[in-house]
Image (cartoon, grey):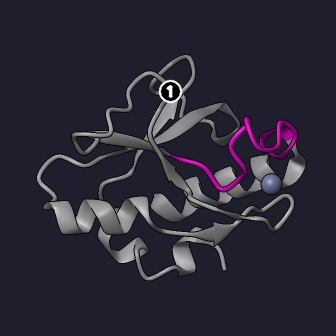
């Protein structure tokens, strides 16, 4: 299952922001820095559902959470205000996955789906 096939996609698709590298007007799909998901305005139930979402890593198929809090931004007592979107293993689990062709292709595909 890819992220846009997961039921959570309905909740997140209109909120995901594509972060571009370089010139903001260029919008070249090869220049995506990352995908950010602001959580402002969502209730805690929706945020927990987002944080608990699981899909297989596009590179190795290990089950992962695609919506993750950035390092240094986590505070277990409060819900995050923003997460980033990744279709691969966290680098702490498997360094290689987010550098694969599959990872880049999936990010490009998601960007295309979002536009
Ligand atoms: Zn992986």
Occupied quadrant, residue 22:
top right
User: Residue 101: horizontal and vertical position, in percent?
Assistant: 88, 48
User: Does any atom of ligand 1 lie closer than 8 Å to the CB of label 1?
Assistant: no
Give the residue at mark 1: 71
Q: Residue furthest top?
A: 22
Residue at 83% across / 36% down in the picture?
Answer: 95
Judged from the image, the secondary structure of the residue bearing numbered disc 1 is loop
Q: State yes or no: residue 38 in magenta.
A: no
User: Residue 31: horizontal and vertical position, in percent?
Assistant: 65, 31
Residue at 71% across / 52% down in the picture?
Answer: 88
Task: Bin the neighbour count of mark 1 within 10 Å (Cα to Cα): few under 14, some 14-19, many 20 and up.
Answer: few
Quadrant of the displayed image that contains ligand 1:
bottom right
The residues colored magenta run: 85-99
Residue at 25% across / 49% down in the picture?
Answer: 39
* 87 to 1, vertically: above or below: above
Residue nearer the viewer, 90 or 26:
90
Quadrant where the N terminus sits is bottom right
* 50 to 73, vertically: above or below: below
Residue nearer the viewer, 92 or 14:
92
Is residue 28 visible to us here?
A: yes
Q: State yes or no: residue 89 in magenta.
A: yes
Mostly what secondary structure, the magenta segment? Answer: loop
User: Residue 96: horizontal and vertical position, in percent?
Assistant: 88, 40
Position of residue 107 in the picture relative to residue 71 (left or right): right
Residue at 57% across / 23% down in the picture?
Answer: 21
User: Residue 55: horizontal and vertical position, in percent?
Assistant: 63, 70
* 73 to 35, vertically: above or below: above
Is residue 13 visible to us here?
A: no
């Amino acid at each position: 299952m890819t992220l846009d096939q997961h039921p959570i996609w309905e909740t997140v698709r209109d909120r995901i922001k594509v972060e571009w590298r370089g010139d903001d007007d260029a919008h070249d799909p090869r220049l995506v820095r990352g995908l950010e998901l602001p959580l402002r305005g969502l209730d805690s139930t929706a945020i927990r559902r987002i944080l608990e979402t699981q899909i297989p890593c596009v590179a190795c198929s290990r089950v992962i959470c695609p919506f993750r809090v950035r390092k240094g931004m986590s505070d277990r007592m409060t819900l995050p205000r923003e997460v980033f979107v990744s279709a691969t293993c966290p680098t702490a689990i498997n360094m290689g996955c987010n550098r694969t062709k599959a990872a880049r292709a999936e990010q490009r595909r998601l960007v295309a789906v979002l536009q």
